[in-house]
Image (tube, rainbow, N blue to C red):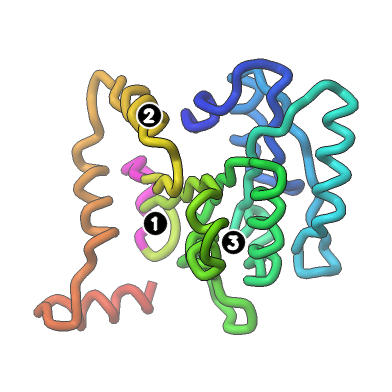
Amino acid sequence: MQILNTIIRGAGDGVLVPVPQYPLYSAAITLFGGSLVPYYLEETANWGLDINDLQHAVAEAHTKGITIKAMVIINPGNPTGQCLSEANLREILQFCYRENLVLLGDEVYQQNIYQDERPFVSARKVLMDMGPPLSREIQLVSFHTVSKGYWGECGQRGGYFEMTNIPLQTVDEIYKVASVSLSPNVPAQIFMGLMVNPPKPRDISYGKFVRERFAT
């Protein structure tokens, strides 16, 4: 959540957050002195969102002197469990492009999908498929962790965020903030290495890896 600290400068800076949502976002925004601007997911539309509702939320925030700096999506949803459709993600990315917003993609439940009707699609994939100018200009931060999915290693406190189209100077400052730690979590870094580089089909352990993954 330290990424929010690089976005929020004061109460005049707002972040669009879905409702229902994971309460860490509202707590972190309050901690950093920003303003939470809610947008509401539609239960009757598989917990998707209507871009008109986003535009209304931005307009209402402006009347209160709040400038929207970023938008959070939780995909798959927490606590709703929905996966945003590719069409909905395109609308969200186009909205962020028009409004010049940083998109924060919380995608930590991407392995917890138990149906085939609506698969998980990452915001970054959709962004890259859309091509220029959006694919080169929209600032996207994507989150993932070993705490969820078939890993289920909550106690390891391991995760990462991938920055797309974030200015290099900003990346350097974020790196400084992330480096301020007395005791780096080495076991979690090992877990993350295994997560992003799992066994490959040519590896001896691959068969066992696949069996255990789908049995979990």
Q: Which mark is residue 76?
A: 3
At mark 2, the secondary structure is helix
Q: Which mark is residue 169?
A: 2
The spot of residue 10 in percent (x, y) is 65, 16
- Position of residue 97 in the picture relative to residue 185 (left or right): right
Please say whether residue 156 is one of the residues in the magenta stretch. yes
Please say whether residue 58 is one of the residues in the magenta stretch. no
**Stretch in magenta:** 151-159
Q: CA distance from mark 2 to mark 3?
A: 31 Å
Give the residue displayed 65% in from the left and 50% down from the top. Answer: 97
Q: Do tag 3 and tag 1 residues touch (Cβ < 8 Å)? A: no
Occupied quadrant, residue 45: bottom right
Mark yes or no: residue 179 visible: yes
Mark yes or no: residue 109 visible: no
Give the residue displayed 65% in from the left and 43% down from the top. Answer: 71
User: Which amino acid is tagged 1?
Assistant: Gly
At mark 3, the secondary structure is loop
Question: Which quarter of the figure is the C terminus placed in?
Answer: bottom left
The spot of residue 74 in percent (x, y) is 61, 52
At mark 1, the secondary structure is loop
Q: Earlier in the sequence, mark 2 or mark 1?
A: 1
- Position of residue 207 in the picture relative to residue 30 (left or right): left
The residue singled out by tag 1 in the image is 152
Q: Nearer the viewer, residue 141 or 188?
A: 141
Q: Please identify, in this view, whether the residue under mark 3 or under mark 1 is nearer the observer.
A: 3
Label 1 crowd (10 A; few <14 / some 14-19 / many >=20): few
Give the residue displayed 25% in from the left and 34% down from the top. Answer: 185
Q: Nearer the viewer, residue 102 or 72?
A: 102
The spot of residue 17 in percent (x, y) is 70, 42
Give the residue displayed 65% in from the left and 37% down from the top. Answer: 23
